[in-house]
Image (cartoon, helix red, strand yellow):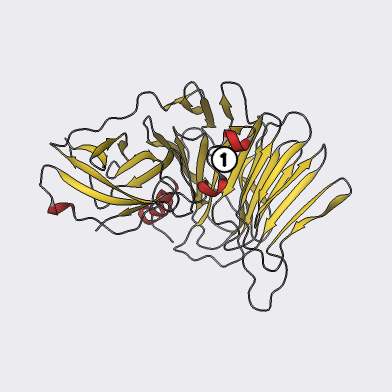
Amino acid sequence: MLDRRRFLGHCLGSAAVAGSSRIADAGANVPDRLTLPFHLKETAGLRRFGYPVHAVLPNHTREQGTHYRLLHQGKVVPAQFRLLEPDQREVILAFNASPGPLETTDYTVEFGPSATPGAEPRGGLSSQHDAGLFQIRNDPYLTSSIPEDLSGLISSIRTKDLEYFTPHSRGLFLTDRESRKRTTLKLPRQGGDGSAVWRWQGPISVGLRFTGTVAMPGGKPLRTIVDLSFVNSKSWIETTWTIDDPDDRVGSMGFDLSLLIQGEPALVDCGAGSTVYSHLRSGEVLSFESRPAPKLGESGPRWLMEQGGASGLKPFAVATPTDRAAEGWVHVMDSTRCSAIAVADFARSGPDRFTIEAGGRVELERRFTLPATPDRPKILKFWIHVVPTPVQVGAVTSPQAMLAPLVVDWAG
């Protein structure tokens, strides 16, 4: 079984660490002003606009009196440096960048007692915990509300003009491998075996972590961590849910969200091998399932969509033998609002399935078909991005860009 230090290490990537493990040798610099250079890489072939970047400074422990700033081509870049809670040993960097397709740019973190502190943007994010809710505001544009026990996962995401959620989300769930019994994740509000902490807070980025246990048949409760991150440049929430399951008792993980859809029909886009779009009228459902690449001797389509109502689901779209893997995202829209949901590593290790109802309910279930190993927890990472319609104007950032974060490669 993983010890706590190793288990938490698996989870840190939800907030941050898209870079390589190569480490810069800070000791070669002047002792009172050191540097950590890195390359920022765009790998998906997409132009980015104010795209959020997070990275933990490698091989670095903050000492009292240390100042930080970020430089690009000799100019100071607005950036945020924060100690990671609760241990306060590591420092996380957050900033926004706008590279072109497949572009690599060079940055340098300068730090030390004599370094000039870098400027942070005025305004931006603020965060508070009050009346049973964690609230993250990007005034006057957006407020996200997260229940302190994680029931439903998200209570509200609201802009100046639009609410995107109803109060009826079920939130995160898992199923027992043997009985298929579904358990909804709900942590203690105070005391007990559960807690929540701001991992970092600042105008550019906020990180929130929930830790606790979830009861499952056949053994001890399983340790679980849920990391959520919020950024000032995008109206999304990035969520990484990790479960330590050394005995392979968890058969699936997922989320069940209730999006606010007003009027008919609900419009749906699906990121399969290419974009497939449809619409849903009252009582209709669309299922979008994808599987890993077939092994030798196996058959069946890589992905399948079915749609229907009371009389049952019928095939709507199916992968051809030459189709590439499904990208793993959906848009769910009415005439004024769009919610984009993208899932990392879609159908890489087992079947993943979206179920979308005309009324706005969206479920994603990830089934684990491969045996677990004691040193590898089960992970579900996804983004929820709310924008006004039309999505081509309101989003600025595509689901494909969400699924391909910019890569921080520390020079060494």
- Find residue 270 and report its horizontal and vertical position in percent: 67, 49
Q: Position of residue 251 (x, y in %)?
A: 62, 59
Q: Residue at x 40, y 47 (%)?
A: 16
* Res. 19 visible in picture: yes
Which residue is disc 1 drawn over?
Answer: 384
User: Which residue is outermost to the bottom?
Assistant: 297
Q: Secondary structure at mark 1?
A: strand
Determine the residue positioned at 48% across, 53% down: 45
Residue in the foreground of this view, choosing between 172 and 301: 301
**Quarter containing the N terminus:** bottom left
Q: Is residue 64 above or below residue 3?
A: above
- Give left or right: position of 91 versus 387: left
Residue 111 versus residue 374 in the image, above or below: above
Q: Residues within 10 Å of mark 1 (few under 14, many from 20)?
A: many
Q: Residue furthest right?
A: 311
The amino acid type found where label 1 is placed reads: Ile
Quadrant in the rendering for residue 260:
top right
The quarter in which the C terminus is drawn is bottom left
Rendered location of residue 357, percent (x, y): 75, 41
- Identify the residue at image location x=82%, y=36%: 282
Q: Is residue 152 visible?
A: no
Count of number-bearing discs = 1
- Residue at image position (71%, 53%) is 288
Residue 243 place in picture, x, y as percent: 51, 53
